[in-house]
Amino acid sequence: MNLRHDRIAQSKPLIFLLCLLPLGWLAWSTTQGQLGPDPVARLEHETGIWALRILLATLAITPLRHFSGWLASIRYRRMLGLFAFFYASLHLLIYLVVDLGGFWSQIFGEIAKRPYITVGFLAWLLMIPLAITSTKGMMRRLGRQWQRLHRLVYLIGVCACLHFLWQVKYGETIAVLEPVAYAAIFVALMLARVPAWLRRRTAATRTSVRPSR
Amino acid sequence: MTKRSIPQLPPSTITPEAIYLRRRELLKGLALVPALLAGCGGQGEALSAAASSDDPSGTPLDFSSNSAYSTKEAKTSQHDATHYNNYYEFGTDKADPARNSARFKPSPWNVEISGHAEMTGNFTLEDLLKPHALEERVYRLRCVEAWSMVIPWIGFPLGDLLKRFKPTSQAKYVAFKTVARPSEMPGLSYPVLDWPYREGLRIDEAMHPLTILAVGLYGRSLPAQNGAPLRLVVPWKYGFKGIKSIVGIEFTEQQPKTSWNLSAADEYGFYSNVNPEVSHPRWSQATERRIAGDGFSLLGNRLKTLPFNGYAEQVAALYAGMDLRKNY
């Protein structure tokens, strides 16, 4: 393909750099001591929230294609998904190494016993197979199974939203607004898929066998 | 090479031995997140310089230091202790209290003393404070959210004040109330808690010499965000027991209702003694992240939480025979 006319290929490095901006900002703030009195808590919060934001951006691609007809936008999806995994990994790493570092016995107890940490950890675990199978070669090899496998992203979204909601103190009507807003965006992105699903279902029943691309 | 040519390092810049001994481990951690942690080692000096600058709010106080009750652990910087606060009447973000409390007027101030005591009534702050000599107590402060600080409070034993009102034999508990002024405290517009904020102690806890009423920190009067002009400090209990900006003290026969307990009884008990054995339903209390020391460090901040926040020797006897799992 001629790169000069391929807008998506041209803009990918830009999106890549945009996705690195939060990391750059956090690194700069860290070196400048701009993260406040409890920098570890701040780093955990910021890497977590960016993982969730980019995950939601990934999930926004399909509805965007349906409603705008901008079909080529799907070519951004893998990079966004991998960046969501990148920030989620950073989030987990900071929690394990920087925050809990040295208190290894507590780590297993926390993951096993604290529901909000369990679901957060589960979300990260489920991202691993998706990251591994994100290459063109794996897509080809897995064929139809690839799409099935990658539907795990919906479960990852549920786990990520729960992980965020669950740590708000009961009765905190203000603090709960942020995770509720993210959960609402997730639900909206799921609902936006319903018309296409319904259309596909009726189409599938009409023509029982139809080759998918 | 002569030894004389080596410049003396101020103690604050010396790496604690515990961190030094873990240096390989720490470096591994650094290698994993290189961009994030790059350069963090060199930031100590710049930040401690900023933190040690005097807070312009607050007036200097006259006090003696009470070293018998004070810890020698590294103190939290004054800036951190006054800019990282849970005081929901000014907002739920930890930066909100410092940001949103400029309109708060800690003077004139009255405190209503009521309930089972021979003397009750409405007293000015000046009358309440007059007979008490102020002393400095450097206490550990353990937040229920699993972070901690070391703060030099200026205050006096609560028991000394309570005794002046001659509580009767029916005074089994002491209930405290925070001021509620919506025009000065923007957080009150939101129903986060059932305002006004309320706390309480058993009378023997209130009379314990470690329990103080604080009027200042770091040698100066309390800033609004730390509970001006008068607050409770109970170092062996979670921080939320230390009620701020007190306008009411009542001697009661029944255990008083407390704000966080009313909000989530299974998460916040009446006693709320620091206890590494009893987890908060959603997180462990076994360890804590210490916010203290000069400068800034990402690694090595986590400590084991001690029973009664390290004050077991002084206060454990208060709870002899009590099931501390049930009475969390």
Image (cartoon, rainbow, N blue to C red):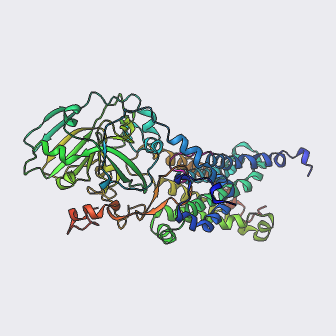
Residue in the foreground of this view, choosing between B46 and A106: B46
Foreground of the two, B55 or A60: B55
In the rendered structure, the answer to whether residue B156 lies left or right of residue A96 reads left
Main SS of residues in magenta = loop
The vertical placement of B53 against A48, above or below, is above
- Image check: A15 left or right of A4? left
The mark tally for this picture is: 0
Give residue B4's position: percent from left, percent from top.
63, 56
Q: Nearer the viewer, residue A9 or B208?
A: B208
- Residue that extends furthest to the right in the rendered view of this protein: A2
Measured as percent of width and height from the top left, residue B203 is found at 17, 53
Q: In the image, what residue occupies the spot 56% across and 53% down?
A: B13
Span of residues in magenta: A32-40
Q: Quadrant of the C terminus of chain B?
A: bottom left
| In the image, residue A164 lies in the stretch drawn in magenta | no
Determine the image quadrant of residue A67.
top right
Q: From the image, which quarter does the N terminus of chain B lie in?
A: bottom right
Whether residue A199 appears in this view of the structure is no
Q: Is residue A4 visible?
A: yes
